[in-house]
Amino acid sequence: MKKAKKQCLGFFGLSLVVAMTMVAASLPTPGASATSSTITDTITVRVVGSVPDINIRGITNDAIYVTPERNFSVDYENVETMVVSLEYTDLEGNVTTTVLDESTPDYNAGTETYRIRLIK
């Protein structure tokens, strides 16, 4: 190999080392930046059961309520379709059934809150 060719390859290699050193020097210093943060992460894990489960809170079946407005919640999980209906019996004994919600939660767990108002 000729002397000029060796010098050219040597200079190229040396300039490559200088460029890599400059890039490495410009990188930020290593350290755990997450330890200086004051943010707290909260992770909530909810396990969905293998069988359908529905719980109604805030209202009781066959109970007599005298207030015209009422709120209640439905907790559900592992349900393909859900129909929430209200059966109202007035003072004369007339029964009225109203469908409040028909939904397809697609097996996801969740809670829905409903407000019923009997007097309009």
Image: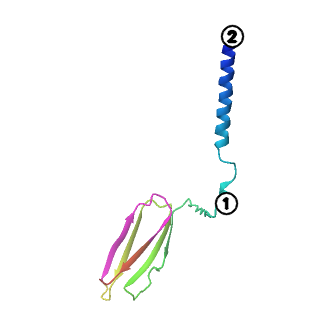
Residue 94 vs 47, above or below: the answer is below
Q: Which quadrant of the rendered structure holds the N terminus? A: top right
Considering the whole magenta stretch, tell me its main secondary structure.
strand
Residue 23 in the image: x percent, y percent?
A: 64, 38
Q: CA distance from mark 2 to mark 1?
A: 57 Å
In front: label 2 or label 1: 2
- Tell me the magenta residue range: 94-112
- Residue 64 quadrant: bottom left
Horizontal arrangement in the rendering, residue 79 relative to residue 5 (left or right): left
Find out whether residue 70 is within the magenta segment: no
- Residue 113 quadrant: bottom left
Q: Badge 2: how crowded within 10 Å, few (<14), some, or many (20+)?
A: few
Q: Which quadrant of the rendered structure holds the C terminus? A: bottom left
Find out whether residue 103 is within the magenta segment: yes
Residue 32 vs 65, above or below: the answer is above
Q: Amino acid at mark 2?
A: Lys
Badge number at residue 90: none
The residue sitting at 31% across, 84% down in the picture is 119
Which residue is label 2 attached to?
Answer: 2
Residue 54 in the image: x percent, y percent?
A: 50, 68
Dot 1 falls on a residue whose secondary structure is helix
The residue sitting at 33% across, 75% down in the picture is 97
The residue sitting at 68% across, 36% down in the picture is 21
Colouring convention used in this rendered image of the protein:
rainbow
Residue 38 in the image: x percent, y percent?
A: 63, 64
Is tag 2's residue or tag 1's residue first in the polypeptide sequence?
2
Residue 54 vs 33, above or below: the answer is below
Which residue is label 1 attached to?
Answer: 36
Residue 50 vs 1, above or below: the answer is below
| Number of marks present in the image shown | 2
- Residue 14 quadrant: top right
Q: Badge 1: how crowded within 10 Å, few (<14), some, or many (20+)?
A: few
